[in-house]
Image (spheres, rainbow, N blue to C red):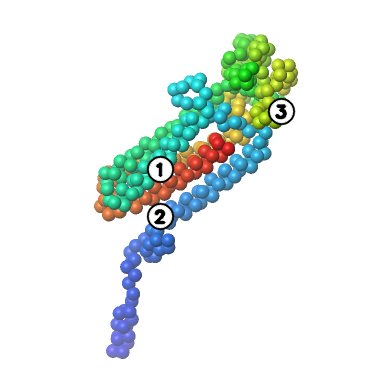
Amino acid sequence: MPIIQNQILHMEATVIRTGTEGKTWGGGNEPLKASYGKMMMWFFIVSDALTFSGFLAAYGFSRFKFIDSWPIADEVFNHFPFLHGVDAPMYYVALMTFILIFSSVTMVLAVDAGHHMKKGKVTLYMFLTIIGGAIFVGSQAWEWKNFIQGEYGAVTTNGGNILQFVNAEGERVALEDFIIDLPETRLSNKRNGALWFAENESLPEYSIEEVKAGFEANKDVFVRTKMFNEEGDKTILSREESLKKLNAEAVGVVQGANLVENEYGPPLFADFFFFITGFHGFHVLSGVIINIIIFFNVILGTYERRGSYEMVEKVGLYWHFVDLVWVFVFTFFYLV
């Protein structure tokens, strides 16, 4: 018995303590000298990056397929708040991008302040990050509103194509600038015209008859197809060709864009725009909400008591990711 007891005592004496007992991850700060929470955030970022890569790759293939008729970004995203009627191609989108990138800079400053345990600076920079993210989300919603409502309008053909209208200088002309009001045609499209409402969920502002009548009466308006010519510009038909094509092929009026119709070009462009920018916008909105939660925890001194601002660093990784994704979305949708 004394021999067995000595062996047991000897075994207990050789037990090695790693110093990680009771921790969430028994491996300590390994591998890559990252905590468990940071590693999980990196796993999420990598998987989400693959998802966005798939979406952007699908967009690229679709654009290549319809390369001759894909909308020109400068003509689609040319609005600026409080400057109605001013052609500002890409100005506001560029401003949105700058604001989002700047919010990433303030997040870097917040993380750095956390490393130095400076609660006041963390609070300030987190607040600026939240403001930047909120402005971006609001701006994206405003872009959606303009895209959905449209500005000029167009007509659809029996072949599923889009016909737009321009003046002699090649500038877009809105339908409201030349249509002729025909009350009798509008009456036939009221709710008591059951056939029309059986095929359409909403009533367009103008009828195709009003567009045709207005076009015939305005000699300075021409039809522009969505196909590009050798110079890289959309093809503008002569007056005679415009009248012939409009009377022979035009079947409906489209204003703005949705998942089925798009006044700017192929509906697939609108589908990708809504899906990819909406998916990214959801990420930004989620980031803003998470930042708000972390912000209040900072104010309450939660991380000061813990002796670490690692949560700020974790949410910072996520915020930098959504900013980087927007750089690619901005490049694919707006610049290329």
Q: Position of residue 311 (x, y in %)?
A: 35, 50
The answer to which of marks 1 and 2 sits earlier in the sequence is 2
- In the image, what residue type sits under mark 3? Gly
Work out whether residue 110 or residue 168 is closer to the camera in this orientation and state it: 168
Mark 2, residue position = 38
Mark 1, residue position = 104
Mark 3, residue position = 159
Disc 3 on helix, strand or loop?
Answer: loop
Work out whether residue 118 or residue 273 is closer to the camera in this orientation and state it: 118
The answer to which of marks 3 and 1 sits earlier in the sequence is 1
Q: Quadrant of residue 264?
A: top right
Instruction: Name the residue located 46 percent from the left edge and 46 percent from the top edge.
Output: 321
Of the two numbered discs 3 and 2 in the rendering, the one whose residue sits closer to the viewer: 2
Work out whether residue 225 or residue 191 is closer to the camera in this orientation and state it: 225
Disc 1 on helix, strand or loop?
Answer: helix
- The answer, for residue 200, to whether it is visible in the render is yes
Disc 1/disc 2 C-alpha distance (Å): 18 Å
Q: Is residue 218 above or below residue 297?
A: above
- In the image, what residue type sits under mark 1? Ser
Q: Is residue 321 left or right of residue 301?
A: right
Count up the numbered dots: 3
Q: Quadrant of the N terminus?
A: bottom left
Query: Badge 3 local density, few (<14 within 10 Å), some, or many (20+)?
Result: few
Query: Badge 1 local density, few (<14 within 10 Å), some, or many (20+)?
Result: many
Instruction: Name the residue located 33 percent from the left edge and 42 percent from the top edge.
Output: 125
The answer to which of marks 3 and 2 sits earlier in the sequence is 2
Q: Quadrant of residue 19?
A: bottom left
Q: Position of residue 138 (x, y in %)?
A: 43, 32
Q: Is residue 87 above or below residue 116?
A: above
